[in-house]
């Protein structure tokens, strides 16, 4: 379904219940809610900037960011909140450096990102948060066009996209780039601390868990942090798994349920770092598959391995059942993760 062009990602075609929570298609440039050719026009200028080779060139800088952030956390002494003192700073600094967004404004856009998707906020409050982020990034895009630098946003000013479209793209990348990576870093660490056998094997580099990249893929599959269903609207009558979906109907695709499919992954509810995870859908599928997935993988690999190396006695500072889970927003995670060492 995610790859079938007979299903549309446009929110204006979605069912009324979905539109009520997302009343418009987002700002121009928000390619997550577009179909080709509009989607292609907005996303194509980005694809060459998120290749595996380009992302690997960023590894030394990401490694430095991780090390410096952990040094600051260590200096503060235990207990520490792994969300605010490690996961969020790392993810925000990395995406800011890539896009060319000043990190000095991180507290504002982090707060706006949360408010935009907070179900406890009313529609006006969520819209105001989105507008504030849009205005901040719109001013930055205009500045980049006048005085380009060596960053992604400056590079995009050479495309045929206008300032409003570039601002919409910047919003998508800034939100997704820090919110998803930060939650994976924190939640991934929490998952490892709750599975001491898996954590011990990973620390020891045992032969069956010596593939760190494979362990990262299993964490991505097991956690599936895009926890709410992905909406698609049928543009024609389509039969899926023996069910007829009529043109105009909306379908909700659950990535977490797909990643817990027992026909694809034996014992799917278990965290198994030795598992063959090929085909998991943590990054989606089709033309909307996550653009920054290689960057996310690098951040998770470097973040987890460096954290475990620097803090061999890392442990939860509160009982696991007291860790506040972030279940009310589209991106699953933890609000706080107190740790000691």
Image (spheres, rainbow, N blue to C red):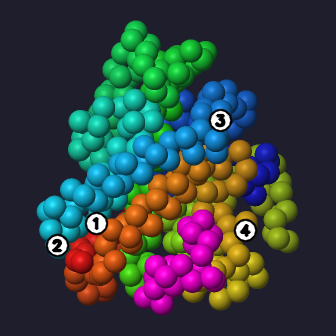
Q: Residue at x 71, y 45 (%)?
A: 287
Q: Which residue is mark 1?
A: 82
Structural crowding at the residue carrying mark 2, measured as other residues with C-alpha within 10 Å and reported as few (<14), some (14–19) or many (≥20): some
The answer to whether residue 140 is magenta is no
User: Is mark 1 in CB contact (under 8 Å) with mark 2?
Assistant: no
Q: Residue at x 40, y 85 (%)?
A: 194
Q: Position of residue 166 (x, y in %)?
A: 49, 25
- Which comes sooner in the sequence, label 2 or label 4? 2
User: Is mark 3 in CB contact (under 8 Å) with mark 2?
Assistant: no
Res 108 quadrant in image: top left
Q: Which residue is mark 3?
A: 47
Q: Which residue is mark 2?
A: 78
- Which comes sooner in the sequence, label 3 or label 2? 3
3 or 2: mark nearer the eye: 2
SS category of the residue bearing label 1: helix
Magenta stretch in the rendered image: 196-217
SS category of the residue bearing label 4: loop
Q: Which of 240/49 is in front? A: 49
- Which comes sooner in the sequence, label 1 or label 3? 3
Structural crowding at the residue carrying mark 1, measured as other residues with C-alpha within 10 Å and reported as few (<14), some (14–19) or many (≥20): many
Q: Which of 31/207 is in front? A: 207
197 w.r.t. 225: above or below = below
- Image quarter in which the N terminus is found: bottom right
Q: Residue at x 20, y 68 (%)?
A: 80
Distance from disc 2 to disc 4, alpha carbons, whole Å, reads 38 Å
Q: Which residue is mark 4?
A: 278
Prevalent SS, magenta region: helix
Distance from disc 1 to disc 3, alpha carbons, whole Å, reads 32 Å
Residue 27 in view, yes or no: no
Distance from disc 1 to disc 2, alpha carbons, whole Å, reads 10 Å
- Which comes sooner in the sequence, label 1 or label 4? 1
């Amino acid at each position: 379904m995610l790859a079938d062009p007979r299903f549309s990602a446009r929110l204006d075609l979605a069912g009324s219940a979905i539109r009520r929570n997302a009343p418009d298609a987002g700002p121009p440039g928000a390619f997550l809610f577009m179909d080709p050719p509009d989607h292609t026009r907005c996303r194509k200028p980005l694809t060459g900037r998120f290749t595996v080779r380009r992302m690997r060139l960023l590894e030394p800088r990401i490694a430095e960011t991780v090390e410096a952030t952990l040094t600051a956390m260590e200096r503060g002494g235990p207990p520490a909140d792994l969300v605010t003192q490690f996961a969020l700073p790392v993810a925000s600094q990395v995406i800011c450096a890539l896009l060319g967004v000043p990190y000095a404004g991180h507290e504002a856009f982090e707060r706006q990102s949360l408010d935009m998707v907070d179900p406890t906020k009313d529609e006006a409050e969520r819209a105001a948060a989105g507008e504030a982020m849009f205005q901040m990034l719109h001013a930055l895009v205009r500045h980049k066009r006048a005085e380009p630098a060596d960053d992604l946003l400056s590079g995009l000013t050479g495309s045929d996209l206008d300032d409003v479209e570039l601002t919409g793209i910047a919003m998508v990348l800034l939100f997704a780039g820090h919110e998803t990576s930060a939650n994976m870093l924190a939640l991934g660490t929490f998952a490892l601390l709750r599975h001491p056998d898996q954590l011990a094997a990973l620390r020891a580099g045992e032969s069956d868990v010596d593939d760190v990249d494979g362990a990262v893929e299993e964490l991505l599959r097991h956690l599936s942090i895009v926890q709410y269903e992905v909406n698609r609207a049928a543009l024609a009558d389509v039969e899926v798994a023996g069910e007829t979906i009529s043109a105009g109907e909306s379908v909700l695709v659950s990535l977490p349920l797909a990643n817990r499919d027992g026909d694809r992954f034996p014992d799917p509810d278990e965290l198994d770092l030795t598992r063959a995870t090929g085909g998991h859908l943590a990054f989606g599928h089709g033309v909307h598959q996550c653009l920054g997935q290689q960057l996310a993988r690098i951040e998770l690999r470097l973040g987890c391995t460096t954290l475990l190396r620097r803090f061999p006695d890392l442990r939860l500072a509160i009982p696991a059942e007291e860790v506040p889970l972030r279940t009310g927003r589209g991106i699953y995670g933890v609000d706080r993760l107190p740790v000691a060492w």
